[in-house]
């Protein structure tokens, strides 16, 4: 029997048809999951944000339990109440000054943008650029959106409060008894893979906790450095701008860039030289964070290569807007753990530290 006869045999045709049908079914399932994920991306990101909050609460609870004789539930209650009181006290202490500065900042930024436009109109290329650009009022509206996004001030207060409550409840319920949800998930896994999947989930929790610690340290350091620098330069709205800088450190790479925009515009209202000094200040602050603080912290924590920070931010930002940009880095951490443990180690058989 020659090879052609083997290929044309009924058995070979049956095997080929089965493989073709299997491939089509798998492709359809993958396409369906991708479409479902795209349609529910906002919900997925909200749930992941709740999971991130649960990791933070559970990490603080475990830390308190290691240093006190408190049982788990009591330690969790102390952490939750303590955080709420701390946040409430901070908001109560800073809210009046912060609200006043935000109002003044909203009035100042249009003048700064107008200054930039007037300066550009002095040159031929600048006039062409201004004439081809969107109207100033649209630019200001976008600038306001950036400020509102970075500061967490939502244009629709009711929607923002509702989202915050959902996020809070997801985080609290997941953190109170994480074993309940982990065991429920492991029940869906075959017996011979449960231990491995449990190890993957544990590693994901550890890496996310480490990432949160690095971000918290960067937020504190950059916020304090920005406040000191702005005070020395005599720039107004120090409280608002330093808080923006600190909060922006939660979003690596793109966050500090957005936070620098209003600070430079405020400096421009003083003088072009002040704006340049503010830009240099923010470069120095980010340099200290990127090349001194973060490397020291990342020696025992987790660090992400710059490209693996920016590229997911661009993709998720295009798909989901600001929430995608904010959650891109922690999602990348989870994905890196899954790829390393489930593919590189389990499939390829390569062990990596």
Image (cartoon, rainbow, N blue to C red):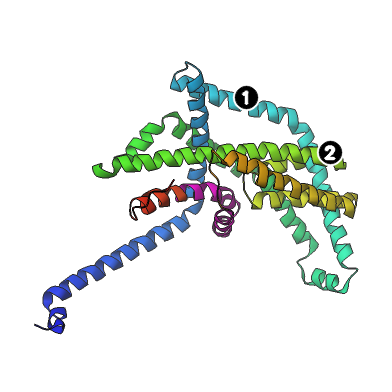
Residue sitting at x 77%, y 68%: 133
Question: What count of labels does the image hold?
Answer: 2
How many residues crowd mark 1 within 10 Å: few (<14), some (14–19), many (20+)? few
Q: Secondary structure at mark 2?
A: helix
Q: Is 322 covered by the magenta stretch?
A: yes
Q: What is the quadrant of residue 242 in the picture?
A: top right
| Mark 1 / mark 2, whichever is N-terminal | 1
Judging depth in this view, the residue of 167 and 198 nearest the camera is 198
Numbered label attached to residue 345: none
Nearer to the camera, 222 or 39: 222
Asked whether residue 237 appears in the rendered view, the answer is no
> Is 164 left, or right, of 170 in this rendering?
right
Q: Quadrant of the C terminus?
A: top left
Q: Circle 1 sits in a helix, a strand or a loop, which is it?
A: helix
The reply to whether residue 73 is in sight is yes
Which range is magenta? 306-335
Task: Please give the name of the residue rendered at 54% of the width and 56% of the height, measured from the top-left corner.
Answer: 312
Residue at the location (85% across, 54% down)?
Answer: 112
Q: Is residue 83 above or below residue 264?
A: above
| Outermost left residue | 1
Q: Position of residue 334 (x, y in %)?
A: 46, 47
Q: Nearer the viewer, residue 7 or 44?
A: 7
In percent of width and height, residue 232 lies at 85, 39
Q: Main secondary structure of the magenta part?
A: helix
Residue 223 lies, in percent from the top left, at: 72, 39
- For label 2, the residue is 231
Which residue corresponds to mark 1? Answer: 85
Camera-near label (1 vs 2) is: 2
Residue 86 falls in image quadrant: top right
Q: CA distance from mark 1 to mark 2?
A: 29 Å
Q: Relative to residue 92, is residue 30 drawn left or right? A: left
Whether 106 is among the magenta residues is: no
């Amino acid at each position: 029997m020659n090879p052609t006869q083997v290929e044309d045999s009924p058995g070979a045709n049956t095997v080929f048809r089965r493989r073709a049908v299997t491939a089509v079914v798998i492709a359809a399932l993958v396409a369906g999951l991708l479409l479902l994920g795209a349609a529910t991306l906002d919900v997925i990101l909200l749930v992941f944000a709740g999971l991130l909050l649960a990791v933070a609460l559970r990490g603080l609870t475990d830390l308190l339990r290691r240093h006190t004789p408190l049982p788990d539930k009591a330690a969790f209650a102390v952490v939750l109440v303590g955080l709420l009181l701390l946040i409430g006290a901070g908001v109560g202490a800073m809210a009046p000054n912060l609200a006043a500065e935000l109002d003044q900042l909203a009035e100042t930024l249009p003048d700064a943008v107008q200054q930039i436009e007037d300066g550009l109109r002095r040159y031929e290329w600048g006039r062409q650029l201004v004439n081809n650009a969107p109207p100033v009022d649209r630019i200001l509206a976008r600038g306001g959106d950036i400020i509102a996004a970075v500061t967490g001030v939502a244009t629709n207060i009711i929607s923002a409060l509702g989202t915050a409550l959902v996020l809070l409840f997801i985080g609290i319920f997941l953190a109170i008894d994480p074993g309940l949800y982990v065991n429920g998930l492991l029940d869906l896994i075959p017996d011979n893979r449960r231990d491995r999947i449990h190890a993957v989930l544990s590693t994901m929790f550890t890496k996310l906790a480490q990432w949160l610690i690095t971000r918290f340290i960067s937020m504190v350091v950059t916020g304090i450095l920005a406040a000191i620098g702005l005070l020395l330069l005599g720039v107004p709205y120090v409280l608002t701008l330093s808080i923006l800088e600190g909060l922006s450190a939660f979003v690596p790479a793109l966050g500090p860039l957005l936070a620098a925009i209003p600070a430079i515009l405020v400096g421009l209202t003083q003088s072009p030289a002040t704006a340049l000094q503010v830009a240099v200040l923010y470069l120095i602050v980010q340099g200290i964070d990127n090349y001194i603080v973060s490397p020291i912290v990342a020696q025992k924590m987790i660090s992400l290569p710059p490209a693996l920070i920016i590229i997911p931010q661009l993709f998720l930002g295009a798909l989901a807007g600001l929430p995608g940009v904010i959650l891109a880095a922690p999602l990348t951490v989870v994905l890196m753990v899954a790829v390393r443990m489930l593919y590189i180690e389990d499939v390829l058989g390569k062990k990596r530290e």
